[in-house]
Image: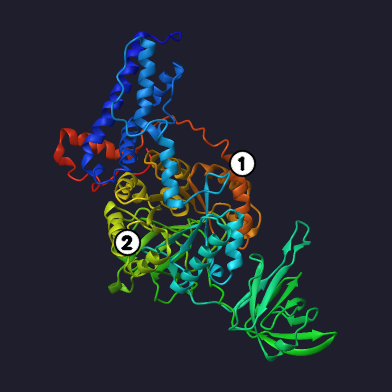
Amino acid sequence: MPHRFTRDVLAATIAEVERLRDEMLLVEQALDTDLQLVPDTWRPSARNLTHYLALRNRDLRELQRNLAALGLSSLGRAEPQTLASIDAVLAALHKIQGTPSTPCANLPVDFHTGPPTLAKHTVELLGDAPDGRSTHVMVTMPSEAAVNPQLVRALLRAGTNSVRINCAHDDPAVWARIAENVRSASREFEIPCRILMDLPGPKLRTAGLPDGPRTLHVRPERGPRGEVVEPARIVWFRPGSTVPDTSPTHERRVPLEGPAWSRVRVGDHLTLRDLRGRIRTLQVSAAGPDHLFTEVRDSAWIETGLEVQLVSDGIERGRFAVGELPATATTLALRRGDRLWVVPEDAECGPATGSTPARIGCTLPEVFRDVREGESIHFDDGKISGTVQRVVSASAGGPRLEVEITAPVTGTRRLGVDKGINLPQTQLLLPSLTAHDLTLLEHVARHADMVGMSFVQTPADVRELEDRMSAHGRDDIGIVLKIETARAFAELPRLILTGLRSPPIGVMVARGDLGVELGFERLAEVQEEILWLCEAAHVPVIWATQVLESLAKRGQPSRAEVTDAAMSARAECVMLNKGPYVLEAVRFLDDVLRRMQDHQHKKFSTMRRLSVSRLAHDALASRAEPKRIADPLGSPGGGGAG
């Protein structure tokens, strides 16, 4: 026996571990009704989750130190096989004491079956991972994927093996073409690729600002001394024609109207005077009957209707006009101390005028019913924050929220439309599945392997989606629970147990909204807890939001993003958002994940009590007072991390 570790301390340690095991079994018994609703093949995972919740319902730091002093397991890797881990520790402790131990007779999983169960469930939801890489890579598809099969093929060849279609954008026809291109590329290259269709949910976003001018700023990529590293590429196309499949990144596409298309030859030049009065000449490097390719090494501002000359051998051969460009977005400049009115999306919005503050619309009218004075409000993933000073009703000239901006602390931030709004202190009484979501389920059932549930709050939300998909004949579809609010995190154990009734299921850590809701200082802690709980339930996790964001959007990752990408290897899937350099981001992430998978299995936890283990607390309480929780999955959960 180690020096200074007395027999009394050893006996007390054994007694404490045995109490832990007893509590695990009590929690399982208390939740037996709910466990029986889980299919036989997934019930061991549900049982293991109840055991882990019981384990994490205590502060185990002193026990950790005592076990470490004996050279035994610290229980820091108990997630996949919790009861078996306790049994193994007890066997070792009794061996040291010289007394016999009695193992549990009915372990749900053990050291040999626990980790493979998570791997099996991951395949059921996400399909097979690529050879040589255990973590899946998911990419949010841009609209271009509907008309550019080459982009889809390139993404799959680079390492993508699941895709996300965001149903908050585009329309069913675009989604169908994206899905068709994905299935075709998957068959062509024999690369399994699952499709996740993400329901919009209650869309709490900014709105209402008028469109800006229809302009386009084209600029090359420059190095640290201002030198052109890569010219800007422009694909000019005849309006109404099919834009050709070309390089999947670094391009701007501009409609060009006029009768001179038949006269264009490779080597000709397009000459224009941009909005700043600067002459720009672009050489035609390739041409077809409805499109041409050019490069520009100087920045240019282009707008709808701008005149473009076709020049060959110094002689003008014809003229074009720039076709209809998308409208640019209007934004509001906000700084600390400014006043901002949040109004309905159909109200007049715009910058401050005279004594009237700047006004931004909000997509959900329920906000004006549920928000209270003094509550915080955040915009655009927390880049802009404020406090609600006054709630004005419709009868008093509103409805509106009068907000005082508190962040950014210094400088100015610009706020545009379609940016997220977070109200972490507000109890929003909203359904997870909106009427619009319900109209989309037919398309989800037709094209998707998985459905993403936004704004999930309660077990009843999960049950409704399961029932709706069953009505569409898709009992087999995977359900991905997006954890993006403080309430969803607090309810996570109940959400998982409910989802296990109709597997396969997964959990997406929507780190953007979650960080704003809980505070970015807590995000690292919270995402760890989600990983632990899901591992205990053998449920795959999708690590999402701003992974390699700078690389995908600007072509260069930050050091912090590289570290974040390496840490993401502990999840079963990592999701990248769209961007002009998303192909490079996929290749980079694929390389990082392959390198990290040989190093990322080590974890040590000090085992502080988790407040999300409240389900275990309630279950234990029900043993003494059965009437306290008639439906353990329907009762409210604890709040946040312990």
Residue 129 appearing in the image? yes
Judged left or right of residue 118, residue 611 is: left
Q: Disc 1 marks which amino acid?
A: Arg
- Of residues 374 and 371, the one drawn nearer to the viewer in this rendering: 371
Residue 22 falls in image quadrant: top left
Q: Residue at x 33, y 58 (%)?
A: 373
Q: Quadrant of the N terminus?
A: top left
What residue is disc 2 on?
Answer: 469
Judged left or right of residue 630, residue 473 is: right
Q: Single out the residue that lies furthest toward the right.
A: 313
Q: State whether residue 174 is above or below residue 57.
A: below
| Mark number displayed over residue 159 | none
Judged left or right of residue 500, residue 170 is: right
Give the alpha-carbon distance from disc 1 to disc 2, as whole Å.
Answer: 39 Å
Q: Residue at x 23, y 37 (%)?
A: 619
Q: Secondary structure at mark 2?
A: helix
- Percent from the top left, x then y, of residue 37? 24, 46
Q: Quadrant of the C terminus?
A: top left
Label 2 packing within 10 angstroms: few (<14), some (14-19), many (20+): many
| Disc on the earlier residue, 1 or 2 | 2
Label 1 packing within 10 angstroms: few (<14), some (14-19), many (20+): some
Q: State whether residue 278 is above or below residue 376.
A: below
| Mark number displayed over residue 595 | 1
- Percent from the top left, x then y, of residue 84? 36, 28
Q: State whether residue 516 is above or below residue 613.
A: below
Residue 307 falls in image quadrant: bottom right
Q: Residue at x 56, y 61 (%)?
A: 412
Q: Disc 2 marks which amino acid?
A: Met
- Percent from the top left, x then y, of residue 523? 46, 45
Q: Residue at x 32, y 61 (%)?
A: 469
